[in-house]
Amino acid sequence: MIVFLDHLIQYIEVEIECTKFRKNERINPDYLNLNVYNGIPLNWTASKRALLELIYALYLTMSINHGKISIKELVGFFSHAFHIPLPGYHTALKKMTDRSPQKVQLESRAFFLDELVTAFNDKFELLDEN
């Protein structure tokens, strides 16, 4: 029961953050329309854990707003931008930080980020060959 309430509280917090973003859009329609992609809505199609890994990496590297943004705000933004609910993100982030490379016999804790780097490097190696 306690776990359920914890997830419910986290879900409500994310929804409140998303509501703030929606409110800003109504007040200023150009709020998110600076370099607009006007095509089909963007949906995150990888796993929620992969998105959280990306969000946490951006947070840790202070890549957005010079680091003057909370992880909660980032999760709310990405949740809204990609139409994906991220309840319980604290639990998922805790599990990520608890990943031990030695336990799973991998070089890194960043499974999704490693996948991105590999795909990126493979593509450019292929382009170099041509």
Image (cartoon, helix red, strand yellow):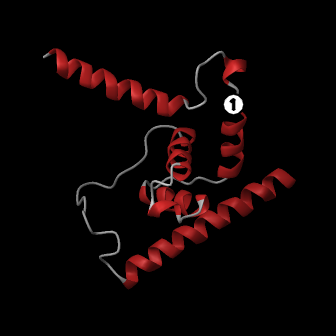
Task: From the viewer's side, name the closer residue of 98 and 63.
Answer: 63
Task: From the viewer's side, name the closer residue of 86 and 106.
Answer: 106
Name the residue rendered at 56%, 47% in the picture.
Answer: 56
Image quadrant where residue 92 sits: top right
Instruction: Report the side of 3 relative to 112 (left or right).
Output: right
Residue 1 appears anywhere in the view: no
Name the residue rendered at 45%, 27% in the picture.
Answer: 115
Residue furthest to the left in view is 130
Residue 103 appears anywhere in the view: yes
- For label 1, the residue is 99
Name the residue rendered at 29%, 76% in the picture.
Answer: 30
Residue 42 spot, x, y in % from top left: 35, 52
Residue 5 spot, x, y in % from top left: 80, 59
Quarter of the image with the C terminus is: top left
At label 1, the amino acid type is: Arg
All told, the count of numbered labels is: 1
Instruction: Report the side of 39 relative to 77 (left or right).
Output: left
Residue 17 spot, x, y in % from top left: 57, 69
Residue 83 spot, x, y in % from top left: 45, 56
Instruction: Report the side of 71 relative to 41 (left or right).
Output: right
Task: Kindly state the secondary structure of the residue where label 1 is placed.
Answer: loop
Check the image and report above or below for 12 versus 42: below
